[in-house]
Amino acid sequence: MSRKMTRQVRPIVGLMLASAMFCAGGVAVVAAPAPQAHAVSMSEYQAKVSNHAKLKSQLVGVSSDLADTILQLADLNDNQIPAAVEAAESAQQAAEQAQSLAEATTQRLQAAQQDKANLEEQIKQTGSDYDDAKAAVAQLARESFHGSSTSDVLDFVTDSTTADDFVNKMQSQAAVTRSESNAATDAANELNTSMNRKDRLGAIEQKITQLKEQADQQAASAQQAASEASAKQTALQKLRDEGTVKREKLESQKSQLTTQSAKEAADIVAMKSQIDSWNNQYNNSNNAAVNPNNNQQQSRPNNNTNYNPAPAPAPAPAPTPNNNNSGGVSGMNYAVPGNCPAGSGYCYGHNTGNTVGGAAYPSRQCTLWAYLRRSQLSLPVGSYMGNGADWANTARGLGYLVNNTPHVGAAMVFARGQSVGGHWTADWQYGHVAVVERVNADGSVLISEGGTGFATFPAWETISNAGAYQYVHY
């Protein structure tokens, strides 16, 4: 893959820096090191302050209790949970590294202990002063002398070049023995490998003592790191539980909202919280299986390729959609959720292209999420829609309605190299695909999306120039 899709994104739970996201036909590859904590820039801080002020202005006239619930949930979405996610991931990485180091040292310790046991057995058999290095070279000399290559034997043992010369130099077995011994001594001294067993045993025992100390220290460090990671994860889950409670409270009190701006603000805040809930469900059901073809794009079915299906998030109740599409909607008369049963091969009067479910899409990628989310909403979706940029053309070929009008549940298609709001660019080779979760009064759209450039699966962001993209409907 020749280019990156580099951008600043807002993950499910808030603002993050996504260093590189490739989104192929299910392929999104991060070519960057593990994410690191970063300081909040002045522009990010000002944006947060501005967003908070805008949200408060939308809630003018709302009861203080309900306004506080919305503001608190927004703070959880945009600030507290993102920071907790980052802290939990960092702690988990540290724990895994510490555990890996401890295991490596333990293996080295076990190898040294085995070396000691082997050497002690050799000492029992032939004594502690026996020089294994010299003995090994002498054995080589004997094997060469008794081997089939006469010229090699002559050269190795006596530097003789002819049989007559050899006979003249080697008149007796004693001479052969002396030659073997001399060759062994010279080789051992030259290679600096001669060490008697007593010295070697002492060196091994010293190394074992050092490794034992290291192993104990590293095991304690690994245990501490694991404990810290667990605490961070617990803190994150506590915040998410708090978010769930506030979201449910907000949903139960939405009827109290009387102004359009307040209703929209509440809808957006609740939807962001819901997307984070999907991410949490996905993680709890274990991450998607690793696809062996993760660096390959998906453009068409390949019967010779074995794909590993990824588990879908636990079914989430579909939100009550706000189909507030500015500028009017032509031909958009279907409901969300739709009426396509999961895995449908034919729905809304056309072939869906759904032949193997979502098994053809690699884990955590944009295309996998688009498939999973459309399936959750009972909307038609195919198994081989291709790379993100290919979804519109593939859908047209199958009979889907495709246009430039956003609608809740539509697959939003980003063309290859398409500039988005001036702050990121879709991958020049693969493009990108997401799912529209809400169409806002100002014409912007809130989307959910997958891709390994995001800290979470799915992630979310708001796109302002919504009319610049193609949308796959039903």
Image (cartoon, grey):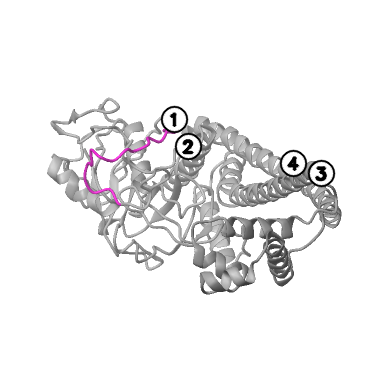
Q: Secondary structure at mark 4?
A: helix
Q: Which residue is mark 3?
A: 120
Residue 327 belongs to the span the image colors magenta: no
Q: Which residue is mark 4?
A: 227
In the picture of the structure, the residue carrying the numbered disc 1 is 316
Tell which of 420 and 407 is nearer to you.
Answer: 420
Measure the alpha-carbon separation of dots 4 and 3.
Answer: 40 Å
The residue type indicated by label 4 comes to Ser
Q: CA distance from mark 4 to mark 1?
A: 31 Å
* Mark positioned earlier in the residue sequence (4 or 3): 3
Please report the residue visible at 72 percent of the width from the left and 66 percent of the height from the top. 188
Q: Amino acid at mark 2?
A: Trp
In front: mark 4 or mark 3?
Answer: 3
Q: Considering the image in quadrants, where does the C terminus appear?
A: top left
Asked whether 313 falls inside the magenta stretch, the response is: yes
Badge 2 element: helix
Helix, strand or loop status at disc 1: loop
Secondary structure of residue under mark 3: helix
Q: Nearer the viewer, mark 3 or mark 1?
A: 3
Q: Which residue is mark 2?
A: 278
Q: Give, as a single range, the part of the protein colored magenta.
A: 297-315
Disc 2 to disc 1: CB gap under 8 Å: yes
